[in-house]
Image (cartoon, rainbow, N blue to C red):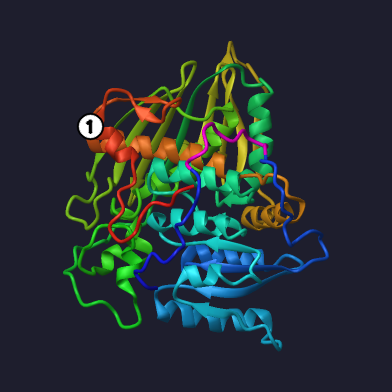
Amino acid sequence: MTKSRRQFLQQSSQLAAGALLPGQLAATTSQSRVTSAADTLSVALIGCNSMGWADLTSMIKHSGVRCIALCDVDQNVLVRRGAELDKLSGSMPGSKAALYSDFRKLLDNKDIDAVVVGTPDHWHCLPTVMACQAGKDVYVEKPLANSIEECNLMVAAARKHNRIVQVGQWQRSGAHWKAAIDYVRSGKVGKIRSIKTWAYMPYGRTFPVRPDEPVPAGVDYATWLGPAPLRPFNRNRFHGTFRYFWDYAGGLMTDWGAHMIDMGLWGMNVTTPRSVVAMGGRFGFPDHAGETPDTMQVLYDFGEFTLQWEQAIGIARGPFDREHGVAFIGNLGTVMIDRDGWEVLPESEAAQYLTPAMPLQRRVGSDLDRHTLNFVECVRSRQQPNAPVDVGRNVAVNAQLGNMAYRLGRKLVWNEADQTVTDDPKANELVKAHYRSPWKLPVV
């Protein structure tokens, strides 16, 4: 990928005022090329490791979907995934995907209808916005972006260009998650007074500090860094473990938190908090590499209830003896949900349950497959997907505010109307995206 800005950021209007309402799609004067279920949907993947690859391989399971292009700045990954894709597609004539190292050139390919953005978090904004500008729909991994400012630009781009943007918060397509949310909203566990969300992950017990080293052969490291600060290559910051460094991501908060907190927001039909406080640190493994906390609690004030996020690396016994989950705690009982299923834990009085107990209702099938299918269906129907860009934006704001409160060591009061932290210049610097030259934020 060249460092030239060329003409790909030459847009003509400023950020649109107002927010896109859930379920609302802006009017358009153009038609998508994919107009019926009989049409083949041609997709491409930008960022071929980990969840990007999982998203793509899930998506091409669905009828009428093919992958025609892959892009990665690591040639080792790109070539390997190209060969794997050939095997998946059966190596039929004309089935080989084009391979790119520059996502901008991929976006110039007019045969591509939609892209999957599976890059590290600091690279979510530019490809998503530019794909929208190129008339392509987008499936982008969570969290939506690595700053609140970038999230707002992505919402504006999807809205302006009338693009379908699905965020990889795939619990939104899970049948058992929806059943549990419906039960919460039914009132059967009474008034919800608090919500617990958490991730206690057993991995990460070993993460030694490593010295800087030469860039591996085949890696365009300058482009991998992109808008992030210029630093020497260190394998701890690269590929899967990038998420434990503030330059590129936000640790467990923006990884698992983007999933679990989203379910709390969904259940209570809320978007952003009044205020947030956080505490924690690198308590479990203080000598490990990385910058993000291995232990943290965050408390959000939503007025009539609180939402708590709790995280830990290297241990797995979280609340309710689950390594991850969401618990809606009401006056009559608690609805507890994780990726395996959901159950109701009733309160009792005078040896009587205040609401009926419900044993574990297990998940059936793949929620990720349902989520990618929902994206494909919405590309064809032009209806809003289950996790549209504004939903991704809302949970990313919560996650970013939690990390900001931890990093600054103080309570933050959020003003949703003007997208700022009240009376806190240092916090508002963290709201912004700070791009390293020659990269610049897109103009929408």
Query: Which region of the structure is painted magenta?
Result: 14-24
Of the pair 81 and 317, the residue shown nearer to us = 81
Rendered residue at 55%/65% (across/down): 54
Rendered residue at 58%/22% (across/down): 333
Q: SS of the residue at dot 1?
A: loop
Report crowding for label 1: few under 14, some 14 to 19, many 20 or more residues within 10 A (C-alpha).
few
Q: Position of residue 367 (x, y in %)?
A: 64, 52
Position of 343 relative to 386 (above/below): above
The quarter in which the N terminus is drawn is bottom left
Of the pair 34 and 282, the residue shown nearer to us = 34
> In the visual, does 55 lie left or right of 303?
right
Of the pair 38 and 29, the residue shown nearer to us = 29
Residue 19 included in the magenta stretch of the image: yes
Is residue 22 at all visible to an observer of this figure?
yes
Residue at which label 1 appears: 409
Of the pair 366 and 15, the residue shown nearer to us = 15
Q: Of the residues shown, which amino acid type is indicated by label 1?
A: Gly
Residue 267 included in the magenta stretch of the image: no
Q: Main secondary structure of the magenta part?
A: loop
Rendered residue at 42%/46% (across/down): 150
Rendered residue at 53%/33% (across/down): 264
Q: Residue furthest top?
A: 350
Is residue 81 at all visible to an observer of this figure?
no
Q: Position of residue 131 (x, y in %)?
A: 55, 59
Position of 67 relative to 388 (above/below): below
Q: Position of residue 3 (x, y in %)?
A: 34, 69
